[in-house]
Image: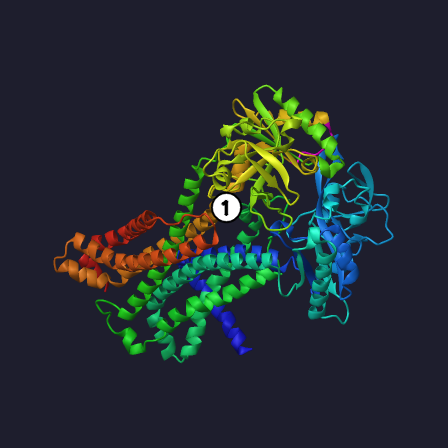
Amino acid sequence: MERLEAVVRDIRLAGRLLTRRPLFATVAVVTIAVGLGTMTVAFSAVNAFFLANAPRDREGMGLIVVGGGGPENDGASFREFEVFARDVPALEIGAQTIVTLSRQRDGVADTTWGLAVSDNYFEVLGVRAARGRTFTATDELAAVVSDRFWRDHLFEASLAGLAVNLNGLDVPVIGVMPTDFRSGLYDNEVWVRMTDWDALRLPARSRRPDAFGLTMVARLRHGATDDLAQLQVQTVAGELARVWPSTNARRIARFVSREEGLPEVRALAIVATFAMAMIGIVLLIALFNLTGLLLSRAVEREREMSLRGALGASRARLIQQLICESLVITALGGALALLVAQWSNRLLATFAPEAPVPQRMDVTPDWTVAAFTGVLIVVSGFAAGLLPARRATSLGIAATMAPPTVTGGARTTRMRAMVVSTQIAGATLLLTVAALLARDAVLSAAVDLGFESERAVVLELDPGSYGYTESATQRFVTDAVTAFRALPGVVSAAAMDRVPFYVGFPTRVEVSVDGRSCALEDCPTVGGYHVGRDYFRTMNIPLTSGRELDDSPADANAVVISETMAQRFWPSVNAVGQYLALGPDGDRVQVVGVAADIKHRSVTEQPEPYVYRPFDQAAFAQPVSIVLRTAADPAPLLQAVSDRVRAMDASLPIARLRTMGQRIAARQQSGTLLVARFFGVCSGLALFLSIVGLVGVVTYSVGQRSRELGIRAALGAAPGDLRRLVAAGALRMAGSGIVIGLFGALLVSWLIAGTLSGVDLDSPMVFVAVGVVQFATALIAVAIPARVAASADPLVTLRAE
């Protein structure tokens, strides 16, 4: 009890002392608040993704990962799910797949994002509805909705008789899920049953044996083990490869427990760890800054602490008092950090890359974030306060009452120099990496993409997801392209299965030019597109030889290839007129044109072989894009395009409609520019903290050396000599920190270049420029304290001593 009362007294004393020194208190609290706030906001994202969004009941939970032939095949088909669910008795298996549904609202069709799930899906996950219930095997047509959808679109209506219009059907709503339940980051609005797939007119393409779009969730049954489940899963996968060799010959499967973690989650964990480490540098700089400020205070309070010791206070008791003062400062900074973290959603939204599906991650701090910040407050308080406390209580009464020396404590000076050098090293490291990434982003933005990137409109549709057959989609797309060509300001229009800078995996096509059968042996693969008439003219892609494709039956077996593909397969002859075979079936086609290489997915990619094929019936089962090239600014045409689609079919939602420039900018945000922005923010905060620390330490050093400087002035030293004396010491501290920081930035840049493909961080000029800027910043930071030192009256200074 006595110890607790002593702590309370120390806290009250610390509060009074801080109010007497408002400038010191403000600088100290803001300094540590910057570090704690940055770390708290970052941990809010880590908590939301890895902790708060974890399944409620993790025991025995996992996924069945099925894949083979490339990352685009990492998933299961409908018939694979049926077999695994039936023939793996060690696991209870459910499935989910992303679907889009049309919902009419005020006569306009909007896209409603959903999950089609197995009847036992919620039971496998161990979750219940917050209102109503989830699916059962005896249900007919039914839907479960998210809490946000229920509140925003159904206006919290009673579930009795409640229905929502999906794909033209009134689907009864039987339950509302809890607010925080969703599938990873995917922010779906409704759940429907896979059993109702055909009734809801969901795309038939997803039911094909070679469509691998299902995610299988699994839970160990009572008494089963991971090893038993693994054995059964692999046995079933082997049997499927034997029974269905055309689709499963190369596919493997395994059970991955939640404890083991998926490869994607482990990769994200590595990225999160790296980001937290970089942000940790900001916190360390803030800690060093606070330590330097407290060291300055410690020297001032040496006499006070010695007097208290002479009056009977033990050294441990004095250290406790000083650490309590440090903890009060960090607690105030932590309170500010938690206040700032309330805006984490907005702050982190600037770092969110474009995603093909809606995503939501609520990063508002919860009790976990508050506990994490509380631990940081305590650790930071002890870390920043222990060394100054030991320094303030290290001298006896005789030493502290003696006249001050001319030069002050060398040990304290060395400690302050080390603190400042470390701060500047961290700031230099982050600033250099940010400058390297920004340079790479600027250079990338100037790269010629090879196609029309300024005067074009991109319309993305998926008629197959809303009940359209392949032939109906073909008719709709043909009519739409014809209608768009008639719009004022449109130069040309064309359809294609996807537009460059798409999100997702590329389409790969096996190619044979020497008569080999790709069904019997491996053939090289190339990228592929399906394109309509006038595609190359609309996209403004030059043809180096030959001609474009058209919609005539004669071109059904014709293709256009890229320059890289022509050089790879026919390096010494003209590729136009040559024949090749595509796919495992060996469809024989003739090359009618060669197109210039373009950038397909990023500005840093190297040219790869691509083949452009005309649309066939299978291609019209997939999402379709239409590009319009305009004579002027394309933005005014967006509304006209939207109106024309609504006039043709008001029940067909528009997936995306934007200019080509907007599309490319959105994709670039998810690359190097995003990482550059992250390092830019960190380096800005670190630079601010290092400047504050440098100015504070130099100002304090001038105060401590006032007697020495006064004697030098009295002995004839000119003001310029005193300025150079003060600045030289500060710049030595800054210089060592800059050198260390540049070396650290070199190591980090090598690490980033090895992680992000196509990133060019090899620029000695950036290192030189950052070093010069940092040195100039340090010079400006010490200018004011040095001028104060040079302008002091030596007589006044010596009398004060």
163 w.r.t. 494: above or below: below
Amino acid type assigned to the residue bearing label 1 in the image: Gly
- Quadrant hosting residue 475: top right
Name the residue located 36 percent from the left edge and 61 percent from the top edge: 422
Magenta segment's dominant SS is: loop
Evaluate whether residue 718 shows in this view. yes
- Quadrant hosting residue 486: top right
Name the residue located 57 percent from the left edge and 23 percent from the top edge: 492
Q: Is residue 323 left or right of residue 666?
A: left
Residue that label 1 marks:
671
Evaluate whether residue 799 shows in this view. no
Residue 646, position as x, y percentages in the image: 70, 27
Mark 1 Cα shell of 10 Å, populated few (<14), some (14-19), many (≥20): some
Residue 189, position as x, y percentages in the image: 71, 45
Q: Camera-side residue: 705 or 446?
A: 446
Q: Is residue 52 left or right of residue 783?
A: right
Inspect the magenta stretch and tell me whether residue 398 lies in it.
no
Which segment is the magenta one? 649-655
Q: Is residue 424 left or right of residue 330?
A: left
Name the residue located 43 percent from the left edge and 78 percent from the top edge: 316
